Image (cartoon, grey):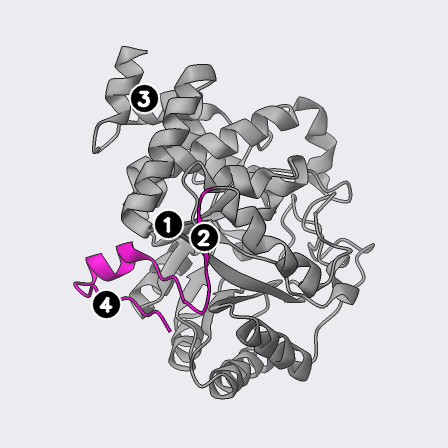
Amino acid sequence: MNAFSDLLQQDGPFTKEQLTAMIGATGAHQTLLHQKANELAVKHCGNEVFLRGLIEFSNKCRKDCYYCGIRKSNRHTKRYDLADETILQTALYAHENNLGSIVLQAGERNDPLFVDRMDALLQAIKKATNGELGITLSLGEQSRDTYQRWFNSGAHRYLLRIETSHRDLYRQLHPDDERHDFEARIEALRAIKETGYQTGSGIMIGLPGQRVDHLADDLLFLKEMDVDMVGMGPYIVHEQTPLADQADGLWPLSQRFSMSLNMIAALRLLMPDINIAASTALQAIDPMGREKALKTGANIIMPNITPASNRKDYLLYDNKPCTDESADDCLSCLNMRIALTGRKAGLKAWGDSPHYFKKNNNNTAQSK
């Protein structure tokens, strides 16, 4: 116990072996880890939990990732694409309900029509909200020119999950072609960062063939990439994907959940001032999963405000929560659930990453 307690009192840097010990922590060690991570989250990012209204506006995707329910080859998925006016009205709903930011998320597309459309949408949202609504994009790999255009039009955060930093494991999760190239993914993250976005990535926990030391390497990868925000959570099977054939060899759901909380906590120790999301996938395993993550180092929640009629068609994994709820349902009890964790909701605030501003020698975070 003393050795582990001493480890948690360090300011870092942490070795792979030390991170592996944190990720595998159980019992009293796990309790200490989670408590320390919660303390650091409040110390470096404040007591507020910042909200990002999630708009899943299209499930059309050019990628064919073996784990994803909206992969191109899934013929069972009903494809949809929200109208521009619907997206704009949903963004206005977020603004009117005191959400400081939205996340525009969709399957990956990079055709000129889509790029131009997003450019116009970003400008329309900024104009309609008087520039007050923060915008995060989660739209996959794009060209440097596209990243720059969207940045110039008002997006200021971009999330591109690596899912695993282990090359061989990455190859097992994707077709072996140029569209799913590991190096291209890394280059896209660099391009996002160099454009000026607050840069986010993320990890899936409990993948087939994944080991605890792989997860430690993932945390060190996030540190090396110097990301500003992270979203990570347990791998959950979608039965209409190739990876579902390997479901029998997975860690139990309870272990994937526990490891996910430990990963959040270990990352908070490793990178104390970044934004870390409490992922929806945690809630798919435990109804209080997001709240538990908020007590183990997370400081961001992304309530789903996608129109209810489309939610069941954006299924990245089975048993995704909140698919039968409206945006009002998702928001109505959120303040109370956050309060149960001893935190408060950060309303009307962008809730930008302190890490981003520190490394850019600008401590004046946008708080509109």
* Nearer to the camera, 259 or 302: 302
Q: Can residue 247 be seen in this view?
A: yes
Sequence-first disc among 1 and 2:
1
Identify the mark at residue 356; answer none if there is no mark.
Answer: none
| Of callouts 3 and 1, the N-terminal one | 3
Q: In which quarter of the image is residue 20?
A: top left
Query: Which quadrant would the C terminus be assigned to in this image?
Result: bottom left
> For the residue labelled by badge 4, is the local secondary structure a helix, a strand or a loop?
loop
Counting residues from the N terminus, which is met first, the one under dot 2 or under dot 4? 2
Residue under pointer 4: 364
Residue 276, x across and y down, in percent? 42, 48
71, 57: nearer the viewer: 57
Q: What residue type is labelled 1?
A: Asn
Q: Give the image quarter of residue 317.
A: top right
Compute the Cα span from label 3 to label 1.
31 Å
State if disc 2 and disc 1 touch (CB < 8 Å).
yes
Name the mark nearer the viewer: 2 or 4.
2
Residues packed near mark 2 inside 10 Å, few (<14), some (14 to 19) or many (20 plus): some
**Which residue is under mark 3?**
17
Q: Residues in magenta?
A: 342-368
- Residue hosting label 1: 47
Residue in the picture at 39% in, 53% down: 229
Which corner quadrant holds the N terminus? Answer: top left
Question: Cβ–Cβ below 8 Å for labels 3 and 2?
Answer: no
Q: Mark 2 points at which residue?
A: 344
Kindly state the secondary structure of the residue where label 3 is placed: helix
